[in-house]
């Protein structure tokens, strides 16, 4: 297809050169020159019109919903080490990160977890809603910095049961890029204290080199001549209780009322430049945005996490949970078993070594025969 384009382009250019040459040679002829100009303008207009009508405008808009379930007073997320489906619901890559961000936030502002006798439920809940809004924006930016820069394409793989995730480079992007340091992100988002915790110099936001990057509260916009990308996080509201986990954990109503579940929507909007739709770099821009949307969905979508949580619940609901005492006892039994195995293997190895030594000893008669020779 590329060869055909070059051939057609070459023929058109050749014809244009010939026409221009003939017109130049007859430049004193008003008829020839006016005809040449008229035809040239008509051809250019037709070409422009055909090009404009062939241009395709492309845009994307995707919404991803993320729900947090947290203790109304302490603000810590619902957590249960012995229940794998709780881990899945919280987001396998987010659960502990969320826990530590809450911990740091409460240390930074103890009033988040304080309760006064005249504090209504609404005040406690509003503190939590605001905190988790900030946490989600922090987690989104961290993910973009580590895994979805415009200078590289990430390949995400999970093991067969989805208990671990690894990232590798699929292929480098051809988009010329620049980096924004985490310290600059913090400076441009002064109202989000969660961005202050655990800052790393190597955590940088990589964007197209000519892009402008602007932040507003819980929102980021990246814009250049190829793309206008906006990511917004809005609070969609919540309700009292542990959401669907109440039934899976077999909580009574009183226990469930200690928690609040709040849902946020991450909206990704991408408008691609129509006049550059066929540009060689546009394919990389589209792949970057597509990978980013896929990454946000996999990491934050409670809908996907809820399906996984229900699968794990069905798989493990009848399996007895090992108590801490049983775990310690079984670990000691393993250590004893391992020590016995080491001794057995060592004895076997010593015996085999002894047999090999006896087999390799030279025959005295052979030694005498070699000496005589």
Image: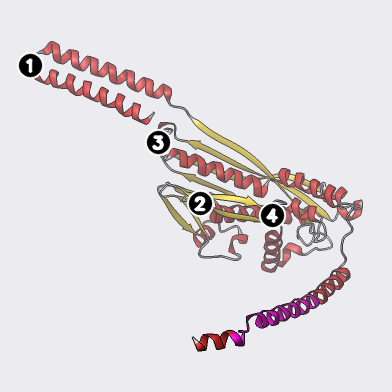
- Work out how far the residue at label 3 is from the one at label 1, CA to CA, in angstroms: 42 Å
- Work out how far the residue at label 4 is from the one at label 3, CA to CA, in angstroms: 40 Å
Residue 324 is situated, as x and y percent measured from the top left of the image, at 86, 69
On residue 132, the disc is 4
The mark nearer the N terminus, 3 or 1, is 1
Nearest to viewer (mark 1 / mark 4): 1
The mark nearer the N terminus, 2 or 1, is 1
Q: Is residue 207 above or below residue 204?
A: above
Residue count near mark 1 (Cα–Cα under 10 Å), binned few <14, some 14–19, many ≥20: few
Q: Nearer the viewer, residue 55 or 368?
A: 368
Q: Is residue 153 left or right of residue 174?
A: right
Majority secondary structure of the magenta segment? Answer: helix
Nearest to viewer (mark 2 / mark 1): 2
Q: Is residue 217 visible?
A: no
| Residue sitting at x 56%, y 46% | 292
The mark nearer the N terminus, 4 or 3, is 4
On residue 28, the disc is 1
On residue 279, the disc is 3
Nearest to viewer (mark 3 / mark 1): 3
On residue 149, the disc is 2
Nearest to viewer (mark 4 / mark 2): 2
Residue 342 colored in magenta in the image: yes
SS at badge 1: loop
> Which stretch is magenta?
339-365
Residue 159 is situated, as x and y percent measured from the top left of the image, at 68, 53
SS at badge 2: loop
Residue 24 is situated, as x and y percent measured from the top left of the image, at 11, 21
Q: Is residue 318 above or below residue 16?
A: below
SS at badge 3: loop
Rendered image coloring scheme: secondary structure
């Amino acid at each position: 297809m590329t060869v055909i384009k070059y051939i057609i382009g070459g023929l058109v250019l050749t014809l244009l050169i010939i026409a221009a040459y003939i017109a130049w040679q007859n430049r004193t002829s008003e008829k020839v020159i006016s005809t040449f100009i008229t035809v040239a303008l008509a051809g250019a207009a037709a070409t422009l019109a055909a090009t404009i009508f062939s241009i395709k405008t492309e845009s994307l808009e995707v919404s991803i919903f993320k729900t947090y379930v947290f203790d109304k007073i302490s603000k810590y997320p619902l957590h249960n080490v012995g229940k794998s489906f709780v881990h899945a619901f919280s987001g396998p890559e987010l659960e502990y990160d969320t826990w530590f961000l809450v911990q740091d936030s409460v240390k930074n502002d103890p009033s988040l977890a304080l309760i006064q006798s005249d504090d209504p439920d609404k005040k406690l809940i509003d503190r939590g809603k605001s905190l988790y809004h900030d946490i989600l924006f922090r987690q989104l930016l961290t993910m973009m910095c580590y895994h979805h820069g415009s200078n590289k394409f990430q390949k995400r793989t999970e093991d067969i049961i989805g208990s671990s995730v690894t990232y590798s480079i699929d292929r480098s992007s051809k988009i010329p890029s620049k980096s924004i340091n985490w310290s600059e992100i913090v400076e441009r988002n002064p109202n989000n204290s969660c961005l202050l915790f655990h800052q790393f110099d190597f955590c940088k936001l990589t964007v197209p080199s000519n892009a402008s990057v602007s932040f507003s509260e819980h929102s980021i916009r990246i814009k250049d001549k190829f793309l206008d990308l906006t990511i917004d996080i809005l609070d969609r509201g919540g309700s009292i209780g542990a959401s669907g986990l109440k039934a899976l954990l077999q909580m009574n109503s009183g226990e469930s009322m200690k928690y609040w579940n709040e849902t946020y929507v991450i909206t990704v909007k991408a408008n691609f430049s129509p006049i550059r739709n066929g540009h060689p770099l546009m394919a990389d821009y589209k792949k970057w945005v597509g990978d980013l949307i896929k990454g946000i969905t996999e990491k934050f979508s409670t809908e996907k996490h809820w399906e996984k949580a229900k699968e794990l619940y069905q798989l493990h609901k009848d399996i007895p949970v090992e108590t801490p005492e049983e775990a310690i006892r079984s670990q000691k039994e393993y250590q004893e078993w391992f020590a016995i195995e080491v001794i057995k293997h060592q004895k076997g190895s010593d015996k085999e070594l002894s047999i090999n030594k006896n087999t390799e000893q030279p025959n005295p008669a052979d030694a005498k025969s070699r000496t005589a020779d």
